[in-house]
Amino acid sequence: FHPTSSRRAMASTLAKRGLVRWRNVLRPELCAALRAEAVAMLEEVSRPSLSAFWHQLQRWLLDPVREPKARHILRAPLTSAVQEALGPLAQRANELELNGARLVELNYTISQPGAPAQAPHSDISPLQSVPRIVTFWAALQDTDLAMGPTVIWPSSHRLARDFIRKLPEELQKPRVVPEYMYVEGQLQAVSRKGQPILEEQLEEERQQSAEAAAALLNAITASGPKEFMAMATGDVVAMDCRVFHQGGANISSKTRVLFNASFQVDDVERSESTDSLHELSPKINGFTYHCLPEVAQAAYRTHDLIRLATKT
């Protein structure tokens, strides 16, 4: 935890380890209000209704959550409680030398009892050096190991970057050409360059990608001690989105709720924000700017959010 470290030291820690922690960032009463809003939203989308059906459809098809059983990502509206909470998070972003970064994600991440552990993953490619996207996670209740806190592999973004760069060039880039195309009226397997190939060659390519992805995950999970985001109410963790992490299995009888906001230093085309394993496994969803349209359109910067918080 870094209660009083200098900006430069904290920014250096984030660059090297991919995470920084703070204690007691959000006051307990605010955390209780945010958690109540999240639980009310979860109850609303759990009732039989058209909006609930739409939520479940998006959840299974579009949401970036892995292992969606008993897990939900709910986009947070800009209520007075949310505005108040964003102020301290934006201040911490500035402390990490992310001054003027844009808010690109705002939601509640919910893990209910029985939620299985996710596979280790990163939210954007470790090959992406700029712009940086950093997620701030705030615990809205005391979170112990039984509740399945997020597990983080420190410095895994650097290890993954070096690993991927050593792969054959064709495995470092996502396949932009479909595996099958119509050639002279016949559906035909094609190479990454769109040239007809045998089905056996396509299967070999798939096998190489799968083996590279498995080797990368093995290297990450064997890289050293992992850290658990077991936190007290109001504690905050900032995580570089290139870092590998996973939601743990919630084997408790309690629902775990996180309030999270992601900040992006500079603008970037969505097509450039790819999952770290997208190059190796195109079926894995990439990072999405998961916030309500009105929040995305407002394009809030850290200084805007600090001002908003002072008005609540």
Image (cartoon, rainbow, N blue to C red):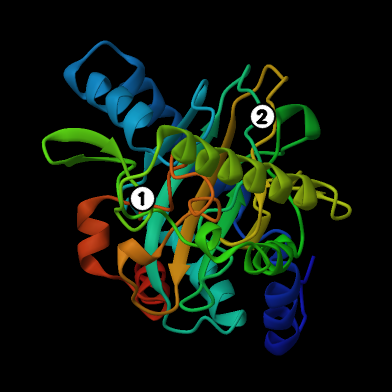
Q: Earlier in the sequence, mark 2 or mark 1?
A: 2
- Disc 1 crowd rating (10 Å Cα; few below 14, some 14-19, many 20+) is many
Question: Residue 297's spot in the image, x, y percent?
Answer: 20, 64
Secondary structure beneath dot 2 equals loop
Q: Residue furthest right?
A: 225
Q: Amino acid at mark 2?
A: Ala
Q: Residue furthest top?
A: 48
Q: Residue at x 58, y 73 (%)?
A: 92
Secondary structure beneath dot 1 equals loop
Q: Residue at x 52, y 21 (%)?
A: 70
Marks 2 and 1 sit apart, C-alpha to C-alpha, by 21 Å
In the image: residue 284, left or right of residue 57: right
Say above or below: 270 vs 12: above
Q: What label sits on residue 117 in the rendered view?
A: 2
The answer to which of 79 and 46 lies nearer the viewer is 46
Say above or below: 11 vs 113: below
The answer to which of 197 and 139 lies nearer the viewer is 197
- On-image quarter of the N terminus: bottom right
Question: Residue 46's spot in the image, x, y percent?
Answer: 36, 17
Q: Amino acid at mark 1?
A: His
- Disc 2 crowd rating (10 Å Cα; few below 14, some 14-19, many 20+) is some
Q: Residue furthest left?
A: 185
Q: Residue at x 44, y 78 (%)?
A: 265
Say above or below: 105 vs 180: below
Q: Which residue carries the number 1 mark?
A: 290
Question: Residue 32's spot in the image, x, y percent?
Answer: 54, 40
- On-image quarter of the C terminus: bottom left
Question: Residue 144's spot in the image, x, y percent?
Answer: 78, 35
The answer to which of 177 and 190 lies nearer the viewer is 190
Residue 126: image quadrant is bottom right
